[in-house]
Amino acid sequence: MTTNHHGAGFDPFHTSSVSSFPCVARCAHGSALAVAAVLAASLAAPVALQPAMAFAQAAESAAAQQAGARPDDLMAALAPYDEQIRQAGSAKDLAAAAADGTLPAATELLVLQRELVARAGGTKLWEYAATSRSHNEFVSWLLNDHAALRHYITGGAVWANPKTGPTADDYLKSLDTLRRIREVHGDDLKAADGDVYLRMMISASMDVSDRVRLWTGDPGFVSKPLVRYETIKTFRSDPRYRFQKELFDALSVENMRYVFENQITDAELPWLANYSLSRHPDADKEGKRLDAYSYIWYGGVDNGFTKDGGYSDPRFYDDALFSGPVTEVKPSDGPGKEPKRWEGGWKQKYGLVYDDANFPNAKPGDPFHIGCGDVSTAPGATTAKTAYHRLWMVFEKGGVCGALAKTFANLNGMVGVPSYVMGQPGHAATATYELRQDKATGKKVATYRIQNAVTGWSKSKSPSVAHWLCGWGRDAGSEFAAPYTLYAQSALNETEAYQRSYLARLVAESYQEDAAKREAVDAALAAQPSNYDAIRAKADLLERMNASADEWLALAKHIAAELAYHPLPLHDLLTSIASKPGAAGQKQAIEQVRIDALTKASKADDAQTINAKDCRDTAADLLKKQGV
């Protein structure tokens, strides 16, 4: 049996002989069913069996037997997993064990493997594994490393095109990113803090949107996940960067992803760290260093930030002015003062060449060099220099709410604090992770606050570019969906309960009968009664099973009790339930449950929730819309 730093498991992809690998490749392309069946069967094979030869020989035999038969690839790939999971026990028993943390490790691993195969398109994963020995070894590792697989699956859906994704190809892209980071930094996983590095690698791999780049200008300079991983790793390991290591190390993958989604180029992230430290060297004034208003004048000089081309101002792309001398646009000594002359040009004023051996930057060709009028060499990228903006240009010209909100997120991510931009009516603000004292318990509890706000959570929208936390609320249709972040974070604060509920729901996928699925979903709700995914799954099953109006009313009362201080998801869920044809007989009662729950939430205090004001405001807004 092969082992790794997180556990043990049979390794169906390991190729101990050169001759076995080509057979795996042939079988992966020649018979979807054969490869899937042999893989799943091999997971339960006796320890004495030689994995490489057993996998190769059995796959070749099965491929010959299939002789042209080509069932649906995904169903064929999942069928052997489903069979083994069902053989392990009933949906009720397995889900109950998952919910209370007693599911055998081998069965849990099988359930997680099935979900990975489902996301990656079934036989597409085997074809990916057959690409090379490196791919083969990586897929084998991930399938058998319990902690890695759990972090990847419970870390949420990969962030791709929000309208059409994620697809199986998006997952394969994510997996290949993870493979490349692990290939270079595999030794990190052997360290005492290997689990932090594991979560970092997975977080870096989860964004496949090609949107991780500076938030303004041409998108040609897209961040490379490997470089972003190495940069964050360096920040975390060196105290001089004032990275918030303790907070960062405790993050779940869902939260940590925001640090890696930071919308800034790879060259500018270490520059921002060094420049901000040079501007604010006093650690006792860290708040000033992380304040976007320390760098950006609202509206710019004389409210003229859009003049002369805005951030495409020709003066920023002039080689002579870049190296100096140049007369600044924004007076360094403050509003109303005389602009200074910088003999070393923009390069001197903004410290674009800085002394940091971790990030070579002085010469063209250095990996973190910021030059004058750099253009991307990416296929299809424009060659127009003024189309590419840099953050220092924003600092010089100024900006309004969008520039400030995005810079807040840049600065927070720089020190390892999850942060993203969201809309408010006619405005942009920043949602930022923080630990806040719960007045009821005295303990620090994770939640999010709003920076650069003109209103509260009740009038805030979903993430502008970043992923939705836990994916919760994306399908609800609410214009001001931001409160779902507070709801999702409260679930993530109960790490064990969240993961157990997640696993119990995954168990349901291997059973075809709705009655069995319902037993598994009920276990997921028992593990975490407030879990949005489990509640949605229960509602879907009730609808399919033609549940009685009384059953719908019971679910409504459950939601009102468990989501008492999350008024927006409570409202959305109860409104949806009340509209179900099967709930018609209790529609008025369900509506009353919703109104009563919102009325209670509109009076929440600090002893009931750490987000009492936001709870009250959101509930009051919803009641006002109803004329209550």
Image (tube, grey):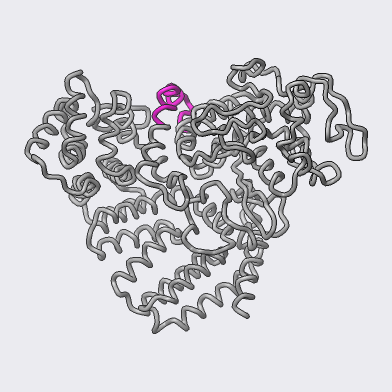
Instruction: Please tell me whether residue 185 belongs to the stretch shown in magenta.
Output: yes
Q: Is residue 481 above or below residue 406?
A: below
Residue closest to the eye, 492 or 227: 227
206 displayed left or right of 322: left
Residue closest to the eye, 195 or 404: 404
* Label tally: 0
The residues colored magenta run 178-195
Q: In the rendering, at what x and y percent does residue 624 appear?
A: 64, 75
Q: In the rendering, at what x and y percent does residue 448 appear?
A: 62, 50
**Residue 104 visible in the current orientation:** no
Residue 339 quadrant: top right
Residue at image location 25% in from the left, 36% down from the top: 126
Q: In the rendering, at what x and y percent does residue 264 appear?
A: 61, 35
**Residue 21 visible in the current orientation:** yes
56 displayed left or right of 292: left
Secondary structure, magenta segment, majority class? helix
Residue at image location 51% in from the left, 67% down from the top: 570
Q: Is residue 535 above or below residue 316?
A: below
Q: Looking at the image, which residue sits at the far right? A: 337
Residue at image location 60% in from the left, 37% down from the top: 218
Image quadrant occupied by the C terminus = bottom right
Q: Looking at the image, which residue sits at the far front? A: 384
Q: Is residue 308 above or below residue 237?
A: below
Image quadrant occupied by the N terminus = top left
Residue 346 quadrant: top right
